[in-house]
Amino acid sequence: MDISQLGKMLEQAQGMKQQMDEQLAAQSFEATSGGGAVTVHMNGKKVLQKITIAPAAANAASGDITLLEDLILAAVNEAGRKVADAETAQANSMLGGLGLPGL
């Protein structure tokens, strides 16, 4: 492989990375915890967009706010994992398209 081909491949990879970032940012990822007691929505940049707490969960947590806090953390962390999984899947898909040896 000569240097000019390598430069073209790097430009293509940068363009693919930008495209991947834009696609992920436009997506919304949802995760729940506590059997639906807490639901969160996060975009592909891992920005939390919305938290929904079921009224029954809020009422049940009135005596133990720690439980509600744990449910929120669990849902946020799960949404973050979903974003990371989507990033990995898109990166693998795009890198395979570059025709790099071993991918």
Image (tube, rainbow, N blue to C red):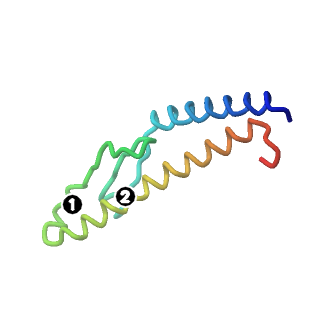
Q: Nearer the viewer, residue 52 or 72?
A: 72
- Count residues near mark 2 (Cα–Cα under 10 Å), then give few for <14, some for 14-19, many for 20+: many
Horizontal side of residue 12 vs 2, given as left or right: left
Q: Residue at x 44, y 53 (%)?
A: 80
Question: Viewer-nearest of labels 1 and 2?
Answer: 2
Q: Is residue 3 above or below residue 91?
A: above
Q: Secondary structure at mark 1?
A: helix
Using the image as rendered, state which of residue 8 and residue 31 is in the foreground: 8
Q: How many marks?
A: 2
Q: Which dot marks residue 83?
A: none
Q: Position of residue 60 (x, y in %)?
A: 19, 67
Give me the C-alpha separation between circle 1 and circle 2: 17 Å
Q: Which mark is residue 75?
A: 2
**Left or right: where does residue 92 sit relative to residue 85?**
right
Three-letter amino acid code at the position of disc 2: Ala
Give residue 56's mark: 1
